Image: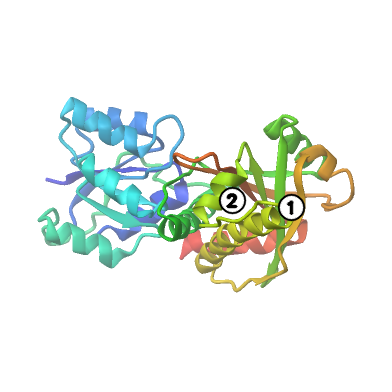
Amino acid sequence: MPTPILICDDSSLARKQMTRALPDAWDVHVSYAANGLEALEAIRAGKGDVLFLDLNMPDMDGYEVLEAIRREDLPALVIVVSGDIQPEAHRRVMKLGALDFIKKPVDTGKVEDILDRYGIFRETPAREGAAREHDTTEGPVAGNINHLECYQEVANIAMGRAADLLARLLDIFVVMPVPKVNMVTRDELLSILDQSFDDRPVSVICQGFIGAGLAGEALLVFHDSHIEDIASLLHYHGEIECEAESELLMDFGCILIGACLKGLSEQLDVSFSQGQPLVLGKNIKIGELFKGNIINWSSILMTDMGCHIEGRQVHCNLMLLFTEDSISSLNNYISFMMTD
């Protein structure tokens, strides 16, 4: 009898990659959930003896799912599959009852190793003419590719790499909401920035990047942040004057932007050349900063990745802005990832 498998992830790309990583000879019935609420309903219906669970999701994240499974004593073996690979994320999910942890993008060998180690997978003879069973004829990724959704997944993994580096260097935990991805005009971008930061003073680091048909700007926007907390994290104990504040913002920004772009380049198999980072402004309103023609592209792919340091007054948004000429190349990379 097929083993009921549930893959819970808000990304169709991630669901497809996880499905492909399951052993070919494993007799399973695969169901899918796009968020934690759907996952719990499926488990209660007997569709998730083994659950592959993402952490960063809308409506109900993976941590909340693990808490609910424990609270209701639901019959599910949970393997977390996440782009958030911080040591503290690993510790927290294991404490909540997860069986193991797999980082994204999923490695087939790692999946098989875990299934074998815990005695979950027992190889059975392949059934002639039978394909793996799915809960729906549509499957996890049928139809046209949703490129924006795929960009979101790629950005989530890249930001996870950046958060992991910060966490290991500074002994912190970075809280990562789900990234937002949109195609916008310049005027729409300025409107989104105005609404997002609501006339609060911000400080902004900018760094350009280019490589293999892709080009853009990384903007790191600090808001609701105390420079004293950033100084403490970076072990700076001197006077925080204007020049020192700029250096602290630059140091923090270089770690975050550099690691995120590295995570992006590894997934797309692209090498980026990075420009010199600049402090665009400190403690000013975002609208004043962009009154000039800093960004003058007519169409922009905007990836907005928010994060904050748990227990510290450090909040920022890392925005990757791709030029309109990059969109075709990005679409090709994503299409290749979906069909590989």
As helix, strand or loop, the secondary structure at mark 2 comes to helix
Going by the numbered disc 1, the residue's amino acid type is Cys
Residue at figure coordinates x 66%, y 64% from the top left = 329
| Residue 45 makes an appearance in the image | no
- Left or right: residue 4 versus residue 315 is left
Check disc 1: other Cα within 10 Å, few if <14, some if 14-19, many if 20+: few
Mark carried by residue 242: 1
Query: Residue 270 at what x, y percent from top left?
Result: 58, 71
Query: Residue 81 at what x, y percent from top left?
Result: 33, 51
Residue at figure coordinates x 16%, y 46% from the top left = 2
Q: Answer whether labels 2 and 1 touch (C-beta < 8 Å).
A: no
Residue at image mark 2: 147
Relative to 166, is 269 above or below?
below
Check disc 2: other Cα within 10 Å, few if <14, some if 14-19, many if 20+: some
Mark carried by residue 272: none
Q: Quadrant of the N terminus?
A: top left
- Left or right: residue 18 versus residue 202 is left
Going by the numbered disc 2, the residue's amino acid type is His
Query: Residue 127 at what x, y percent from top left?
Result: 17, 58
Residue at figure coordinates x 26%, y 64% from the top left = 110
Residue closest to the eye, 221 or 183: 221
The answer for how far apart the CA atoms under marks 2 and 1 are is 42 Å
- Left or right: residue 247 versus residue 134 is right
| Mark earlier in primary sequence (2, 1) | 2
As helix, strand or loop, the secondary structure at mark 1 comes to helix
Find residue 47 and report its image quarter.
top left
